[in-house]
Image (cartoon, grey):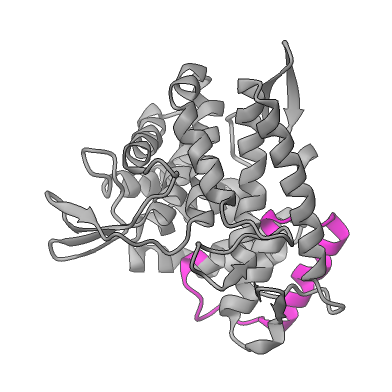
Amino acid sequence: MQALLLVLVAMTPEAEIRAHADAILSKQLADGAIVHTQDGDQITISPYFGNYAALGLFDAYQVTGDKQYLEGGIKWTDWYFKRMDIRGVIHDYEGTVDNYESTGSYTATDSYAATFLMCVNMRRMLTKDHRFVMRETGKIFAAHKAMISTLDVDGLTFAKPDSPYKYVMDNAEVFEALWHSRQIAHLLRNYAWIHEVYYTRRDMSNAFEELRGEDTLYAWAKAGDAPVTVEDTGEFYPAGLANLFAVALGPAGRHDRRATLAATYERFPNFIDLPPDHLYWWIAAAQRVGRKDIAIRAFEEMKPKVEARGLAVDHAFYIRAVASIKRAYTGPRRTKVLMGSTFIDIPRQAVR
């Protein structure tokens, strides 16, 4: 059965990725916004989920070479830039297609900004348009500052200024986004920015180690100085999902990541009731440590659920899952950054 599933995944046509990318574009408004949910004429727009939808479009472009997907991702980042405030903070939106407004609230500042910085750097890598980076330097740096504005002395970020919790999921995204932020800082030759990223990643790596227990599982959050352990809940969300984020994006070494994934799989072996976005993180984590058996199982469970929910972010995660399992990316696997007066190539995996 496992061999058959591998064959089926290998045969997934490019047309399938196009279909899911087209589904994302069908939810993109003329101004670049990507609708998250819709009920009749009422819509919601989530910057967080919109960022992942845009990353799906960028991935679709890397697989297909179709510039309409690249343009869709660019339009989204432009939409985001226009709606950030001077602190780099952005709100959720709701209303109708023709008239939506800010809710004045957001779920997080760290993860919204982190996933946006991933989008910005992917746009830079794929377009090689450094002029846009120069043009938007102030806003990009504001997003960087928004991401780490809630950084605590222990090296972890609170979800937002008034949140009592430092979530492992958010911090894993911040850790990943700091790499993207550093690439932009190198391009701009902003050495203070580069050093800030270096020390923040170092402290965050140490903080992650403190949250990893003897059973190799991470705590799902930390409240002030008191860790909230994974044993506090038997539910996959947030305990299991937090560990998948840590494996997929976090700083641990390969051996430790494999051990954490295996322990998470042993604790939460049931995939049946998981939504597509949760299943994606099983795939991303399993792929990172070479457990393709788990990735394939999650992928097969994910496929029918994507169409059932029909969210742009689900289509994006499906694209990313297929491209990852097939190793179908044709875009840049290395990125050129400017250090001093010399351009050098840095393998992406070498700095994670």
Quarter of the image for the C terminus: give it.
top right
Q: Residue at x 36, y 63 (%)?
A: 307
Q: Is residue 274 magenta?
A: yes
Q: Position of residue 342 (x, y in %)?
A: 74, 12
* Residue 312 is at least partly visible in this image: yes
Magenta part, dominant SS? helix
Vertical arrangement, residue 20 with respect to residue 42, above or below: above
Quarter of the image for the N terminus: give it.
bottom right
Vertical arrangement, residue 266 with respect to residue 66, above or below: below
- In the picture, measured across the screen, residue 223 lies left or right of residue 159, that is right
Observer-nearest of 299 and 201: 201
- In the picture, measured across the screen, residue 204 lies left or right of residue 21, that is right
Q: Residue at x 65, y 66 (%)?
A: 168
Q: Position of residue 345 (x, y in %)?
A: 74, 22
Observer-nearest of 157 and 6: 157
Tell me the magenta residue range.
248-277
Observer-nearest of 96 and 198: 198
Q: Is residue 181 magenta?
A: no
Quarter holding residue 267: bottom right
* Residue 4 is at least partly visible in this image: no
- Looking at the image, the residue that sits furthest to the top is 341
Q: Position of residue 213 (x, y in %)?
A: 82, 76
- In the picture, measured across the screen, residue 289 lies left or right of residue 120, that is right
The mark total stands at 0
Q: Residue at x 70, y 27 (%)?
A: 191
Q: Position of residue 115 (x, y in %)?
A: 52, 48
